[in-house]
Image: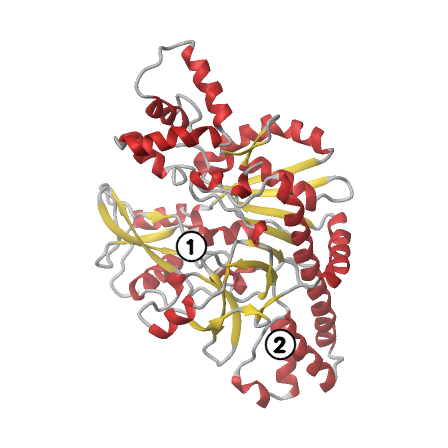
């Protein structure tokens, strides 16, 4: 690329990242021109892009799911790299501040938090070794956030106590494992989970698993296979200055930045998975709500299997060349009605062979069924019909930073959305012959984002890969299903643990 010359040292750094010069140059090109916004057609709604599953379908879908699960086809993929420090931002400010009223309110609410008894135990143990001092609020915050006590300011969110059942505490990770036990166990009682973590949390989470695994397995009469991975360095992205020059640190070395949660596509691709559930670590309910959550997980999984089976039968016909015009018509109806695929404007003029090729291409893709909840003001993306450059339309999970916020029309469509993406989805990662898809072949590389950061006090900009459930899955077969709001219980700030849905 014109104007970019890598030194021998640069090439060595790029190689050590597990990247090629060509990939780095592509990233630079994207950073310089910026992302191309999506073109929203309209928000999805029940009956128009969002499916409502009726009670009459529950048994058939659940039976289909249970049969596949019993054969060990199911696993759970949990993005868990988030640090708890963000969750406790308000409390860090309180620790360094002097707002008496806010501190009084904190002390009143403190006993209601699920980790209160663990905090009491830590503080009691400390009193044997050192005298108490300072005001009660500052002391409590110190024991919550620092290594003097619970170390919650340094731990991953996975290891924060989310629920107190009286006879036991459960961290977010333990709750995810209990939920997995209710819907992923095979005929041998094995539950498979995969967590993606930040490198600095890998050992801490591993040690926690060593402490809790035997106890959980005895109690649940099941066994767990829990694998851990980190974001690969090859998914990092090059940084540029605000003037589009290569950003270098004080020693002159190139700087690479983590590529956002879309980088986890590599982890997902390497799972060799079949039916894979994806759910954020902080979206977990206590036991009294898990029953409804598990019912809907099985329904989503069952619907995925039904669609996969029908698509596979059509793909066999197309692959064998044994189809008729009426067969193509049924396949087109399936794509339109079941998969919400709207072909390009030129489709009606295609020959039969061209239609067959088009339908094969569209059916032979990974599947995902995404639960959608009614939007009650949570920040984040949602389900939309998106226009393609060829006149087609597809269902996409869209974040606000993917649209042209300077367009009144696009903002109006965005604001009209009625549903929200809770990141609760089930994916089919194998083709009709049972072979794993290469997921990179179904990502929209143009749905990247540009983020502004700083390094050593200097501003920089870096690319973020297409989001895992946004652009990274843009070319998957996608179905949105309305699920109850009770299945969605995210914990973005520590105060969320006081919501009614988190009372164990």
Residue 18 higher or lower than 152, as above or below: below
x 71%, y 28%: residue: 218
- Of residues 405 and 445, which is closer to you in this image? 405
Residue 352 higher or lower than 427, as above or below: below
Q: Position of residue 403 (x, y in %)?
A: 38, 67
x 31%, y 30%: residue: 95
Residue at image mark 1: 379
Neighbours of disc 2 within 10 Å: few (<14), some (14-19), many (20+): few
Is mark 1 in CB contact (under 8 Å) with mark 2? no
Q: Position of residue 402 (x, y in %)?
A: 40, 64
Place residue 56 in its image quadrant: bottom right
x 54%, y 28%: residue: 207
Q: CA distance from mark 1 to mark 2?
A: 30 Å
Residue at image mark 2: 336
Which mark sits nearer the N-terminus, 1 or 2? 2
Horizontally, residue 27 falls left or right of residue 43, namely left
Q: Position of residue 76 (x, y in %)?
A: 61, 47
Place residue 461 in its image quadrant: bottom left
The quadrant in which the N terminus is found is bottom left
- Of residues 98 and 222, which is closer to you in this image? 98
Q: Nearer the viewer, mark 1 or mark 2?
A: 1
The answer to whether residue 274 shows anywhere in this view is no
The answer to whether residue 43 shows anywhere in this view is yes
Q: Position of residue 172 (x, y in %)?
A: 54, 37
Q: Secondary structure at mark 1?
A: loop
């Amino acid at each position: 690329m014109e104007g970019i010359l890598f030194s021998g040292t640069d090439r060595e750094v790029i190689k050590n990242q597990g990247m090629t010069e060509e990939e780095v140059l592509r990233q630079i090109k994207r950073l310089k021109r910026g992302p191309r916004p999506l073109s929203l057609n309209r928000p999805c709604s029940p009956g128009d892009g969002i499916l409502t599953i009726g009670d009459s379908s529950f048994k058939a879908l659940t039976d289909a799911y249970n049969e596949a699960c019993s054969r060990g086809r199911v696993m759970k993929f949990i993005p868990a790299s988030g640090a708890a420090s963000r969750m406790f931002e308000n409390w860090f400010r309180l620790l360094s501040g002097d707002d008496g009223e806010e501190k009084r309110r904190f002390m009143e609410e403190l006993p209601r938090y699920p980790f209160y008894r663990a905090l009491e135990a830590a503080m009691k143990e400390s009193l044997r070794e050192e005298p108490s001092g300072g005001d009660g609020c500052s002391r409590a915050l110190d024991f919550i956030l620092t290594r003097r006590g619970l170390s919650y300011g340094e731990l991953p969110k996975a290891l924060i106590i989310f629920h107190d059942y009286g006879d036991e505490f459960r961290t977010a990770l333990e709750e995810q494992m209990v939920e997995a036990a209710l819907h992923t166990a095979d005929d041998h009682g094995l539950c498979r989970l995969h967590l993606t973590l930040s490198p600095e949390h890998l050992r801490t989470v591993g040690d926690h698993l060593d402490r809790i695994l035997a106890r959980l397995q005895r109690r649940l009469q099941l066994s767990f296979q829990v694998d851990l991975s980190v974001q690969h360095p090859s998914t990092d992205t090059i940084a540029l200055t605000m003037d589009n020059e290569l950003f270098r640190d004080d020693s002159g070395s190139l700087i690479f930045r983590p590529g956002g949660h879309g980088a986890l596509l590599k982890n997902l691709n390497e799972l060799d998975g079949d039916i894979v559930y994806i759910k954020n670590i902080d979206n977990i309910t206590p036991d009294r709500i898990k029953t409804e959550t598990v019912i809907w997980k099985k329904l989503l999984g069952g619907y995925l299997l039904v669609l996969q089976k029908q698509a596979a039968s059509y793909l066999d016909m197309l692959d064998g060349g044994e189809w008729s015009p009426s067969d193509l018509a049924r396949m087109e109806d399936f794509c339109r009605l079941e998969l919400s695929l709207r072909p390009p404007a030129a489709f009606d003029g295609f020959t039969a062979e061209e239609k067959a090729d088009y339908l094969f291409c569209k059916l032979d893709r990974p599947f995902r069924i995404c639960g959608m909840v009614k939007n009650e003001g949570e920040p984040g993306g949602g389900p939309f019909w998106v226009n393609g450059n060829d006149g087609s339309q597809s269902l996409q999970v869209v974040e606000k930073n993917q649209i042209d916020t300077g367009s009144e029309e696009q903002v109006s469509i965005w604001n009209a959305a009625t549903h929200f993406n809770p990141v609760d989805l089930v994916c089919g990662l194998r083709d009709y012959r049972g072979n794993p898809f290469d997921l990179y072949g179904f990502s929209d590389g143009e749905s990247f984002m540009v983020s502004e950061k700083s390094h050593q006090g200097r501003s920089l900009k870096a690319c973020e890969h297409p989001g895992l459930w946004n652009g990274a899955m843009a070319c998957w077969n996608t179905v949105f299903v309305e699920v109850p709001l009770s299945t969605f219980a995210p914990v973005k700030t520590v105060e969320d643990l006081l919501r009614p849905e988190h009372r164990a």
